[in-house]
Amino acid sequence: MTENRYHDFFSELKYFIIELGIDDGKIVGCSDHEIASIESRIGTALPEAYKEYLKSVGKKFLFEFFDAEQMSFGDYDDINEYVTNTLTETGFTFEKEVFPISHRRYDFFRFFYLNESDNPDIWFFDEYPEDGKHIQNSRQTFVQMILDFFSQALSNQTAGFHWVTAEETKKNENIVRDRYLKWFEANLKLKNRTRETHTDNPFVLELYKTFNAYFSPANERTALEELGKYKNKTAKNDSDKVTAEPENKKTSVKPGFWTALKRLFS
């Protein structure tokens, strides 16, 4: 039952990430053989929550979802090399078996203790702590940490919509607008999913709660209004166009749309 809950949670999370276009094209899970290769190296089973993460979305580096923190199967050797070097330089020794899961640009690494829980607590190791304490409890389980990253990814995703090159604008002068409209459509689809799906899985319910905290009723109304305005996406209007400024490659969007964005993301 517990394993199914983790499986269902990460399957649902994968669905949300793909629909939202976060790390588009990079959402790939590990094979059983790849997971077994890790367990063979450490000599024990991995926690169920972590294994289900690897199976669903954990194979590739997800820059957008994890905000540049390296936490994938593909990063496994790099993570362990950094951890080994850090422990050597600090002279620190763990009293219990740990499993490093990530590093943040070689500033710190996250880990959990092995053989303690199917959904283990996550800890930080800081190489240069101000208080002299290398280890700090994050006060989050693995699933809670994933939900925190999901919340952060939701808030950060639209910032990238405004990075538009002159070449991209030449191909589609409404590129920024179209990115937002696609985002609105995905959010509305997922909002309906949270309403229509009946589940008693506490992790899936927390996923829905996290999403609904971002896509509030006010934001939903704004999305519906904007989609209504632009449902005929092929229509061209000079006031709707996005143009790139050659020198700094900034974009401009009509005032009405900026007003909507301010309402949506404030």
Image (spheres, rainbow, N blue to C red):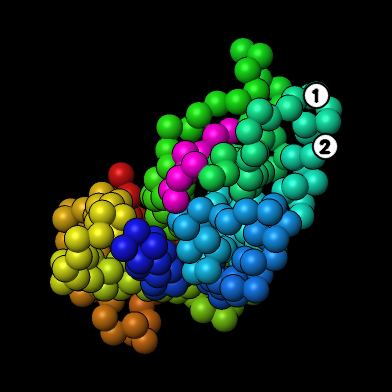
Q: Range of the magenta residues?
A: 116-124
Relative vertical location of residue 48 with respect to residue 181 in this rendering, above or below: above
Residue at image x 35%, y 66%?
4
Give the Cα separation between the discs numbered 2 and 1. 10 Å
Which class describes the residues within 10 Å of circle 1: few (<14), some (14-19), or many (20+)? Answer: few
Q: Is residue 120 magenta?
A: yes
Expressed as whole percent of the image width and height from the top left, the position of residue 169 reads 56, 73
Whether residue 176 can be seen here:
no
Q: Is residue 204 left or right of residue 45?
A: left
Q: Residue furthest top?
A: 131
Q: Is residue 181 magenta?
A: no
Expressed as whole percent of the image width and height from the top left, the position of residue 183 reads 37, 68
First in residue order: circle 2 vs circle 1:
2
Q: Is residue 30 left or right of residue 180?
A: right
Give the residue at mark 2: 85
Identify the element where label 1 is drawn.
loop
Residue at image x 26%, y 73%?
189
- Circle 2 or circle 1, nearest the eye: 1
Give the residue at mark 1: 91
Expressed as whole percent of the image width and height from the top left, the position of residue 117 reads 45, 45
Amino acid marked by disc 1: Gly
Relative vertical location of residue 244 with respect to residue 122 in this rendering, above or below: below
Amino acid marked by disc 2: Asn
Between 97 and 193, the one lying in front of the other is 97
